[in-house]
């Protein structure tokens, strides 16, 4: 799995999840339980990881949705 995004923005996470799910891109949201446990103070951002073979496609879909500035450089 390859990390493509890291954020504390729950709305952004939800939007990215819906894009990836709709296009059947394998993904995982890491650290969501730890981020909730720390009280959402922003110390532990959630991370979106995608299958390495689908990274290019996932990035392209996110850019096409107008959210490319949110991506980590990869």
Image: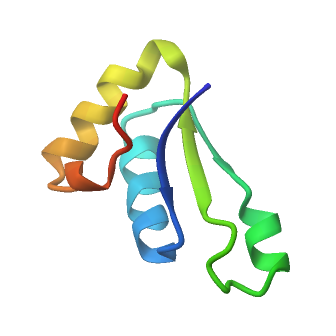
From the top left corner, tell me how far across and down residue 11 is, in percent: 43, 75
Taking 12 as reference, is 32 left or right? right
Q: Eyeballing the image, is 42 above or below 24?
A: below
From the top left corner, tell me how far across and down residue 52 is, in percent: 52, 17
Q: In the image shown, does 42 or 33 lie closer to the viewer? A: 42
From the top left corner, tell me how far across and down residue 51 is, in percent: 55, 23
Q: Eyeballing the image, is 34 above or below 18?
A: below
**Residue at 77% in and 77% down:** 36
From the top left corner, tell me how far across and down residue 17 is, in percent: 47, 53
**Residue at 62% in and 60% down:** 46
Colour scheme shown? rainbow
**Residue at 59% in and 51% down:** 47
Q: Quadrant of residue 70?
A: bottom left
Q: Eyeballing the image, is 15 above or below 39?
A: above
Pick the quarter of the image with the N terminus: top right
Taking 6 as reference, is 58 left or right? left
Q: In the image shown, does 3 or 20 lie closer to the viewer? A: 3
Q: Quadrant of residue 23?
A: top left
């Amino acid at each position: 799995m390859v990390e493509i995004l890291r954020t504390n923005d729950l709305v952004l996470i939800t939007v990215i999840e819906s894009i990836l799910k709709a296009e059947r891109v394998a993904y995982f949201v890491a650290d969501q339980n730890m981020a909730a446990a720390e009280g959402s103070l922003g110390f532990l951002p959630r991370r979106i990881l995608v299958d390495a073979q689908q990274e290019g496609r996932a990035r392209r879909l996110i850019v096409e949705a107008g959210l490319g500035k949110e991506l980590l450089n990869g």
